[in-house]
Amino acid sequence: MKLRVYYDNSEIQAEILDTSSVEILEPLSLDSEKSESEIIMESLNNPVSSPNFERFIQDYESILIIVNDHARSTPTPKILKHILPVLAEKKIGIIVASGTHPLPSEDDLKELILGEFYSELRDILVFHNSKAESNFITLGVTSRETKVRINKIINDYDAIITINSIEPHYFAGFTGGRKSFLPGISAYESIEANHSLALLDESKILQLKGNPLHEDFEEAVRFVTDKHPVFGINVILDGENKIVGSFAGDLFELLYEGAELAKKVYAPPVTEPPDILVSVVHAPLDQNLYQAQKGFENCLLTLKPGGIMILVASCYDGIGPDDYASMLQSSETPEALAEKFEEIKNHYQLGWHKVGSIPTFLKDKELWMVTKLPLEQLHKMFIRGFENLQKAMDEALRVKGKKSRILVVHDSANVCPILQS
């Protein structure tokens, strides 16, 4: 059979022997009698634990809109299309909730973030900078000792609208909701303190209740919502990037409702662990290894011991943040990296939570990549690199056998295969 997968805004192929058993997973595509516009409008008119959108904004003169950056697939322009006419008489501002990510380019603004509204909104849009100390106000400290420092722009407006999307997240449970504020427009030290909780076993994908990192998110963001009126708008995309769900209103309640639909779309069952797992990371999370690692994390528990994971991600922007990159390349063996990871837990730096799972995985499995990253860099991270998918598949089948069971996970940074007991 011919395997076709996404790679670097294009498609690459590999021929697989028919003797292999191949299972393909992707986000579920849902048939809906309603259009995307109808789905969005229904959520605005019937929000969760909140007055409807028009009623919410009517008493406020100025509105701050918080939008996602280029590292998320949120279809922000489709939502702006429905709310901007209602806000025509209001003073509005827009901030890109970039957390600690690199700032988006003008092309990102035109193509992903503002779309058709670029010329109308560009002059009022600002970027969040997590390290600009003068940007922040301190609102309190959570019970887990996260100092809550939020961009002071929230004090310049009467009310806040957040635009986001809900997908599985490998340590926060799900994206969306509260993440517009933390990490979205929080100070670096707040993000770092919160993300240190990713080291705890209970901070895991598809879990909100009992997830300490998510609970810290909520506690931190309530310092904002207790003083500022906030109306959230979160959508869910299916396998064809169509909006199949929209949840609006209370920032916390909408996430719990939306997470149930997100599970249906993004958490398909797998009946048997594969020998070879092809994890295909789609844009925009294929930009660097730091983001593409989500495709590794989401799939790692599905693979059979002794198996091979082939992570397909171009990583056109390199490895990612310097601290993360240097830590990954700092040891001679996976065992030494695991020891170093244990040593640094007590003086955590942002990004290091991603390091520990790789040497653990490599104890009884192999990690390969089809990527643009240089082979010498991959070697330092104990990853075997290939220049194309065909060579990777041929070698994997040579190693594991022509009758190997193969699992292909499309959009793996969002899809979380669930192995059935």
Image (spheres, rainbow, N blue to C red):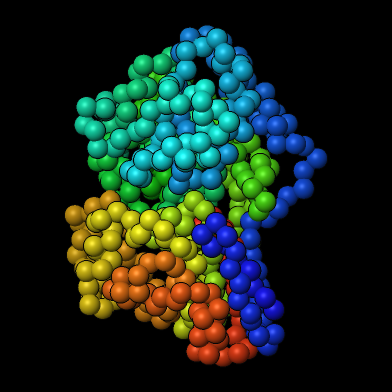
Q: What is the x, y in percent for residue 298?
A: 49, 62
Q: Is residue 184 above or below residue 261?
A: above
Q: Residue at x 47, y 57 (%)?
A: 286
Q: What is the x, y in percent for residue 189?
A: 24, 41
Q: Is residue 334 visible?
A: yes
**Count of picture labels:** 0
Q: Residue at x 55, y 56 (%)?
A: 9
Q: Is residue 230 visible?
A: no
Q: What is the x, y in percent for residue 141?
A: 27, 34
Q: Is residue 160 left or right of residue 404?
A: left
Instruction: Tell me which corner region of the image, top left, top right, bottom left or bottom right, holds residue 338.
Output: bottom left
Instruction: Tell me which corner region of the image, top left, top right, bottom left or bottom right, holds residue 32.
Output: top right
Q: Quadrant of the N terminus?
A: bottom right
Q: Is residue 192 left or right of residue 4?
A: left
Q: Is residue 380 left or right of residue 59?
A: left
Q: What is the x, y in percent for residue 249?
A: 57, 27
* Front one among 369 and 251: 369
Q: Is residue 80 above or below residue 1?
A: above
Q: For the view shown, which residue lies furthest in the right direction?
A: 33
Q: Residue at x 63, y 89 (%)?
A: 403
Q: Residue at x 48, y 9 (%)?
A: 61
* Front one among 253 and 122: 122
Instruction: Tell me which corner region of the image, top left, top right, bottom left or bottom right, holds residue 36.
Output: top right
